[in-house]
Amino acid sequence: MDNATEVFQPLQADDPPMVAGYRLAVRLGAGGMGRVYLSHTQGGRPVAIKVVRPELADDPAFRRRFRREIKAARRVRGAYTAELIDADADGVPPWLATLYVPGPSLAEAVARRGPLPVPAVLWLMAGVAEALQAIHGAGIVHRDLKPSNVLLAADGPRVIDFGISLASDGTSHTTTGAAVGTPQFMAPEQATAGEVTAATDVFALGQTAAFAALGTPLYGDGPSVSVLYRIVHSKPDLSLLPAQLRPLIARCLAADPQERATPAEIVEWCRQRLGRDPDAGAGPAVWREVTGPEVTVPSPVPDPTPVHTLPLLTRPQPTEPDKRRARRRRTALVTAAAVTTGALLLTGLAWTVMDAADRLRHRDTAASSTPGPATSARSTASAAAPGAGGRTPETPSPSSTAPPQAVAHPLQWLDEKNSLDIKEPVERKDRKGDIRFVCKETSCALESDTSVISMLYGKPGATPDSCRIALTGADSHRLPLAAAAAGSEICIKHPSGDIALLVIQVKSTALPNSGVSFITADMTVWRTA
């Protein structure tokens, strides 16, 4: 993040100017759930407004989950979290507002300057662990803690996006692993669809801290299936980490969740090694170097004010002679109008009588002859032709092509036992649907006998048009999932013309032949009729 233009993007034509009374200043980004904007409170404090995608907002089940998550997130109060300050699950569209944190994400800071020094990593771990204490205390498991979800403010880190994960006591999705996750920062139990607990977030904290110290993911890059396989089956190589960090990160990355350090233990361990810095009221000098130059936040958008294009003139008051002349003019005008109206009525009446006489003559002429099939056909045609007197009945103009209808089907589960149809009902318990999840010895893929499949690359936020472009010329009915991850967007075109969009939420393909591989995805179908 070298300048503000990388953070603040101008509003586009399809961005709303206001959401629930918050005037939007700029766009901050977009994701699978919706777009994020910068706005301000009435007092001028900057806030981040997340607006839910329309197709998700139309789904009652999504609104119920979103309402529950908002309720849980309101309970989170911590110095190292971006606090939820306002939200409306019943809004059109649903939205939430959190305090805006002016600073780069950890991912951006590492990309800009490289690995962080040991004191900065210790400060990072202590702050994130304290944030997890507040989040777990509210009954929430983050599930997607990673460098891009940790913002680096001048006085310490801030954990964001905890408000969009499922409450830990909410539904069965909590224990089946159907939640957000990024392969490089998943815990083993999350990768294999095991029980997700607060210890899962501690594992992600260990991976995030290792990324900060190394500049690269601890388990390496490459296809997601390979990364997840290493997470599940191999011990992490900590030899490249600074010696001071190895003991704590090793405890965070213990394979057994019961053996991992608790957030409270992490905070205490880091404070002992930071010495007096935590009590100084701000981060050490090296931390301020990591955060980079202060970001200038755009000012609040002013309320629109009426603009007068012409000066207001004071009209002189009429005198008594002027009033009398005006009355005489009005009387003359009314009289002329009455005469004109009478003339028009008489003319119309004359035309009506003549028209009726003509129709009577035509009827008598037609009655004197016996109509055959051709005559009947001509008579039928003439009924639809221009009427008497040259008057032509109005015909409706062709209607323009209606936009495709978006139908949302959030949190769809795909494994090797079920399938999805693009036509409703979409969920199938068999393998006869349009979209199937298949795994072979080393990889998994999406396959279809009916539809063409293509993955989108680039910025998130797919539309029917972007899917059509991606599918133009495509002829593949199979898409390997090695390059897919949480947030990946996949376009699918049915022979009927309907287009489906899958936004992957979780991909668990580390063990292709284990019987536990699966994906969960939000599916939107744009129907042509």
Image: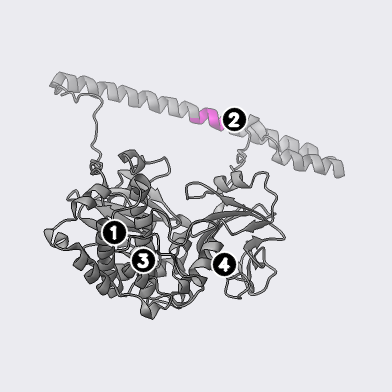
Camera-near label (4 vs 1) is 1
Q: Find disc 3 in the rendering and name its residue.
A: 206
Q: What residue type is labelled 1?
A: Val
Between the C-alphas of marks 4 and 1, the distance is 31 Å
> What percent of the width, then of the height, locates residue 185?
43, 63
* 123 relative to 194 in the view: left or right: left
Q: Find disc 1 in the rendering and name its residue.
A: 121
Tell me the quarter of the picture where residue 431 sits.
bottom right
Query: Does the magenta run of residues contain 158?
Result: no
Viewer-proximal residue, 43 or 118?
Answer: 118
Q: Are marks 4 and 1 in contact (CB under 8 Å)?
A: no
Q: Find disc 4 in the rendering and name its residue.
A: 509
Between the C-alphas of marks 3 and 4, the distance is 22 Å
Residue ID at (66%, 35%): 387
> What percent of the width, then of the height, locates residue 284?
19, 54
Binning the other alpha carbons within 10 Å of mark 2 as few (below 14), some (14 to 19) or many (20 upward) gives few
Between the C-alphas of marks 2 and 4, the distance is 83 Å
N-terminal of the pair, mark 4 or mark 1, is 1
Residue ID at (26%, 74%): 265
- Whether residue 370 is visible here, answered yes or no, is no
SS category of the residue bearing label 3: helix
Binning the other alpha carbons within 10 Å of mark 1 as few (below 14), some (14 to 19) or many (20 upward) gives many
Magenta region: which residues?
A: 345-351
Camera-near label (3 vs 4) is 3
> What percent of the width, then of the height, locates residue 309?
26, 26
